[in-house]
Image: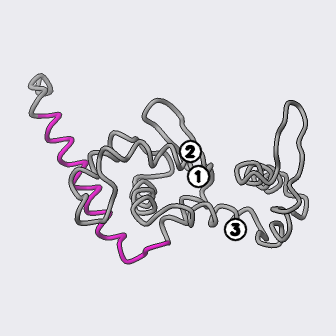
Amino acid sequence: TRGNAYFIMELLCDMEAKEILLKREEEYTLDHSKFSGYLLSFESVTSIWKSRVEELNQKEQNLLQLAAFLGFTFDSTFLKDAVKLSVSTFHLPGIDEVDSVLHKALRNRLIQMESISSYTFTHDIVQFTFLTSFPETSDRYNYLIGRTAWNKLHYDVINDRNWLM
């Protein structure tokens, strides 16, 4: 770990999630049968995050990639609006699956919750991983995000006639 405390923390959390490190009451025990070769598979905290991303299916990765285009901090309501416009075009999960994908990303420590509908990526490297995973889609996602923002703004203006006063 070269003394990187954050790497150690992520490594321990990953080991606990994969049941290599087992907590019983106030003690931790190591499952040696699963531990063999585990440490050799990770050279940095980035490699841990990449392995967590690879645990997601393609639709889940696409959704988090779209979230990465929304920003380091993103709103799940806005993300759902973008999904409504493009479920079939971008091979995304359905609108009813967005919350479960976000919960899975929370469990995998890829994102963290800021408030009821606001999330952030755990680190800028995690966001960058999603941004660079499919570079050919960036223009389409930027268009989709712009279109979603325009639709939301248009809807808000139409439904709030007092904005002129």
Mark 1 burial class by Cα count in 10 Å: few <14, some 14-19, many 20+: many
Residue 164: give its label.
none
Q: Label 1, on which residue?
A: 110
Write the start and end of the magenta stretch as one range: 133-157
| Structural distance between the alpha carbons of marks 3 and 2 | 18 Å
In the depicted view, which residue is nearer to us: 72 or 77? 77
Residue 41 point in image, percent of width and height: 77, 72
Q: Is residue 22 magenta?
A: no
Which residue is farthest front? 33
Tell me where residue 40 sits by quadrant.
Answer: bottom right
Q: Label 3, on which residue?
A: 47
Q: Are marks 2 and 1 in contact (CB under 8 Å)?
A: yes
In the depicted view, which residue is nearer to us: 24 or 52? 24
At mark 3, the secondary structure is helix
Q: Residue at x 46, y 37 (%)?
A: 118
Location of residue 75 with respect to 37 vertically, above or below: above
* Sequence-earlier tag: 1 or 3: 3
Q: Residue at x 21, y 54 (%)?
A: 85
* Sequence-earlier tag: 3 or 2: 3
Q: Is residue 153 magenta?
A: yes
Q: Label 2, on which residue?
A: 106
Q: Amino acid at mark 2?
A: Leu
Tell me where residue 127 sits by quadrant.
Answer: bottom right
Q: Residue at x 31, y 45 (%)?
A: 80
Q: Is residue 161 left or right of residue 122?
A: left
> Looking at the figure, which quarter contains the N terminus?
bottom right
| Structural distance between the alpha carbons of marks 2 and 1 | 6 Å
Residue 3 point in image, percent of width and height: 90, 58
